[in-house]
């Protein structure tokens, strides 16, 4: 017998509607930002082209969302506030969901935990208003207003003080609201958004409705939300596989971030945080990013609503694909393809940042109102004077290009400076190559191509290592035995939930096979697939490449330098070294002219 009620039989009772709504609200509305998300999604579902959001005290005191969508009639208002009432589905097919909303939960939940007023007007009807406070419905009243809806939510969680205590500072809650609006605005370029802090009268976010065709509109909108430099450093993605399509933008590896803060994934327009998709995003970049760096990308997966279940998470933040492998494979291959194609591009911000460092402040010594001191004059002369025409000790200049190749993207090598920097002349500017980084990448790609062509050399274990697993885990790992063998890890069933490891990749010294297998199993459980072994093999190849590369400090003659440039042009992904740093940058003549104020 438990300690709750000795000798007493508990009574089962039906909770009243207000209590039931408050409990439901606990799942739907976690914080002001989740209320904003529900209300803005409703406005989008109503076909709004303009959505204005105002908040006060991080949304705790006030959230007001105004839209110019289809609106509701006076009769609609009480229905909109009752649970399980929705205009968006008829309930016959829960896998055919084409709107953000489908549960009829959001408004009654918000009305149960705050003071909610709906004011709305549908085309051809008068405006009407209805208030609900802590779950208690008022009467429908006539109101004034344009077509569309205003939802005002005051004192969120006043009816559930426990929840109120868990909220964070106004600033943190405001930031969460900004993030929600930014995400929704990314997927809806034709809708204009504003977010205002009503206390401070400050506009926190604004994006005017974009015009034109979808992809261009999307590009402009993402530039506005993510920053221009993101778009300038991003590759357009557009791929389709088995009725699933993927579009969006993925940043060059040289534009990676220290945390996964610039990753935005959408499924049929709905922002999601999905393990499968973020895992696929990581896998797509696996080869070109150092560990600890995170790709920046905004990706939209579009598919028939029947191929994805959105009804798996209370805040709809997760989805479940009917064919997860197809979705994952599409993301990985589209990203790899785009990144390989962009092998010769490195981040423009690198060059821009370099220019910013190099740019000197204009010297004002010619201005009549400015009488420079002696020190200022000699400093400005020092800045403007040529560095001297004598060759620096480690600069080697090629008098004539060995093989003039003006059209080649990386140009003709003209000099090697400080025994690591190759300077090449292109049709429109100059290219500076980091010789060590470039060579390392080339060797890595060569090693990988060899491994792909000849298979990965294995080393047979004298005594097979037995790894004890659960039956289910043993079955799961054995189901991918062929893939593992292709990467050099040979396993066999050993009976009773155990597997025997017979061969391991010769490349990897001191392999902890049981641990590797358990890690792979975790990946499989987590993401449905595992790149761990591949990543381990690649990491070894990468460090072999690093040791086998031309170190900085080696002198190269013109032929060698040009050969390196040509090989870079042929090799996919040669724009970044194995650690994601650029291997070369280009300064356009126009940039150089800018530097000199021409
Ligand atoms: N801004 C709006 N403009 C027009 N109609 C709206 C608006 N907001 C809500 N409604 C109407 O009120 C109904 C209830 O909204 P609510 O958000 O509670 O449920 P839902 O959007 O249908 O489903 P979910 O709970 O998944 O969000 C909607 O189905 C819609 O008909
Ligand atoms: Mg809704």
Image (cartoon, rainbow, N blue to C red):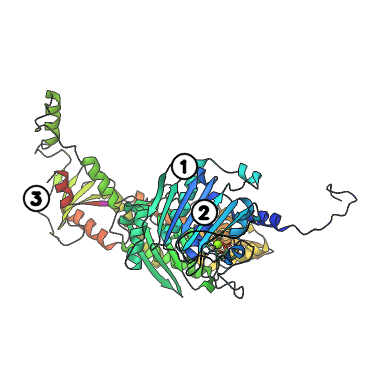
Q: Are marks 2 and 1 in contact (CB under 8 Å)?
A: no
In the image, farthest residue toward the right:
7
Q: Which residue is mark 2?
A: 36
Mark nearer the N terminus (2 vs 1): 2
Q: Nearer the viewer, residue 311 or 382?
A: 311
Confirm or reject: label 2 Cβ below 8 Å from ligand 2: no
Q: Locate residue 570, reporting x and y percent.
A: 27, 63
Density class for disc 1 (Cα within 10 Å; few <14, some 14-19, many ≥20) is few
Q: Secondary structure at mark 1?
A: loop
Magenta part, dominant SS: loop
Q: Locate residue 516, reporting x and y percent.
A: 55, 55
Q: Which residue is mark 1?
A: 199
Q: Which residue is mark 3?
A: 399
Residue range corresponding to the magenta coloring: 572-584
Q: Is residue 286 above or below residue 126?
A: above
Q: Is there any visible trace of residue 556 in the rendered image?
A: no
Density class for disc 3 (Cα within 10 Å; few <14, some 14-19, many ≥20) is few
Q: Is residue 316 left or right of residue 256?
A: right
> On the image, which quarter does residue 102 sit in?
bottom right
Q: Is there any visible trace of residue 373 in the rendered image?
A: yes
Is residue 56 a member of the stretch shown in magenta? Answer: no
Q: Locate residue 380, reporting x and y percent.
A: 14, 32
Q: CA distance from mark 3 to mark 2?
A: 66 Å
Q: Nearer the viewer, residue 18 or 578?
A: 18
Q: Is residue 297 above or below residue 94?
A: above
Mark nearer the N terminus (3 vs 1): 1
Q: Residue at x 22, y 46 (%)?
A: 421
């Amino acid at each position: 017998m438990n300690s709750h009620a000795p000798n007493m039989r508990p009574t089962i009772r039906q909770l009243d509607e207000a209590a039931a709504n408050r409990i439901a609200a606990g799942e739907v509305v976690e914080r002001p930002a989740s209320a904003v998300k529900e209300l803005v999604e409703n406005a989008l579902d109503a076909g709004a082209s303009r959505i204005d959001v105002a908040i006060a005290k991080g949304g705790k005191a006030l959230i007001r969302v105004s839209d110019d969508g289809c609106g509701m009639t006076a009769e609609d208002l009480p229905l909109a506030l009752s649970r399980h009432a929705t205009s968006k589905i008829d309930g016959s097919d829960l896998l055919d969901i084409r709107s953000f909303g489908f549960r009829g939960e959001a408004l009654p939940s918000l009305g149960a935990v705050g003071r909610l007023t709906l004011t709305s007007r549908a085309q051809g009807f008068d405006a009407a208003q209805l208030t609900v406070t802590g779950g208690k419905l008022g009467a429908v009243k006539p109101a004034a207003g344009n077509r569309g809806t205003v939802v005002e939510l005051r004192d969120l969680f006043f009816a559930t003080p426990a929840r109120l205590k868990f909220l964070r500072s106004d600033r943190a809650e405001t930031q969460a609201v900004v993030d929600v609006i930014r995400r929704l605005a990314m997927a809806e370029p034709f809708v204009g958004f504003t977010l205002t802090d009503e206390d401070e009268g400050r506009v926190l976010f604004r994006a005017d409705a974009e015009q034109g065709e979808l992809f261009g509109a999307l590009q402009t909108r993402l530039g506005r939300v993510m920053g221009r430099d993101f778009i300038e450093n991003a590759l357009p993605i557009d791929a389709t596989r088995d009725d699933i399509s993927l579009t969006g933008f993925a940043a060059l590896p040289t534009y990676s971030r220290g945390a996964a803060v610039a990753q935005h994934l959408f499924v049929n327009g709905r922002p999601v945080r999905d393990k499968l998709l973020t895992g696929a995003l990581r896998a797509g970049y696996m080869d070109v990013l150092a560990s600890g760096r995170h790709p920046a990308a905004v990706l939209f997966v579009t598919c028939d609503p029947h191929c994805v279940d959105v009804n798996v998470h209370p805040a709809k933040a997760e989805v479940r694909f009917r064919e997860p492998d197809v979705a994952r494979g599409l993301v990985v291959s589209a990203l790899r393809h785009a990144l390989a194609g962009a092998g010769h591009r490195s981040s423009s911000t690198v060059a821009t940042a370099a220019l910013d460092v190099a740019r000197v402040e204009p010297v004002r010594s010619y201005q009549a109102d400015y009488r420079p001191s002696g020190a200022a004059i000699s400093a400005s002369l020092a800045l403007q004077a040529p560095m001297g025409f004598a060759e620096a000790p480690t600069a080697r200049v090629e008098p004539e290009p060995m093989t003039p190749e003006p059209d080649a993207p990386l140009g003709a090598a003209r000099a090697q400076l400080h025994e690591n920097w190759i300077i090449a002349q292109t049709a429109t500017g100059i290219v500076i190559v980091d010789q060590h980084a470039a060579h390392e990448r080339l060797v890595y790609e060569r090693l990988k191509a060899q491994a792909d062509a000849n298979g990965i050399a294995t080393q047979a274990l004298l005594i097979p290592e037995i790894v004890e697993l659960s039956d289910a885990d043993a079955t799961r790992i054995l189901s991918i035995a062929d893939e593992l063998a292709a990467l050099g890890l040979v396993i066999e069933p050993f009976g009773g939930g155990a597997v025997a490891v017979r061969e391991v990749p010769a490349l990897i010294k001191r392999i902890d096979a049981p641990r590797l297998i358990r890690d792979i199993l975790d990946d499989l459980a987590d993401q449905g697939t595992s790149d761990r072994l591949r990543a381990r093999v690649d990491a070894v190849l990468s460090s072999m490449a690093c040791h086998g590369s031309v170190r900085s400090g080696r002198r190269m003659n013109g032929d060698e330098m040009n050969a390196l440039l040509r090989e870079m042009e042929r090799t996919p992904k040669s724009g970044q070294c194995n650690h994601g740093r650029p291997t070369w940058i280009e300064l356009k003549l126009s940039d150089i002219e800018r530097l000199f104020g021409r």
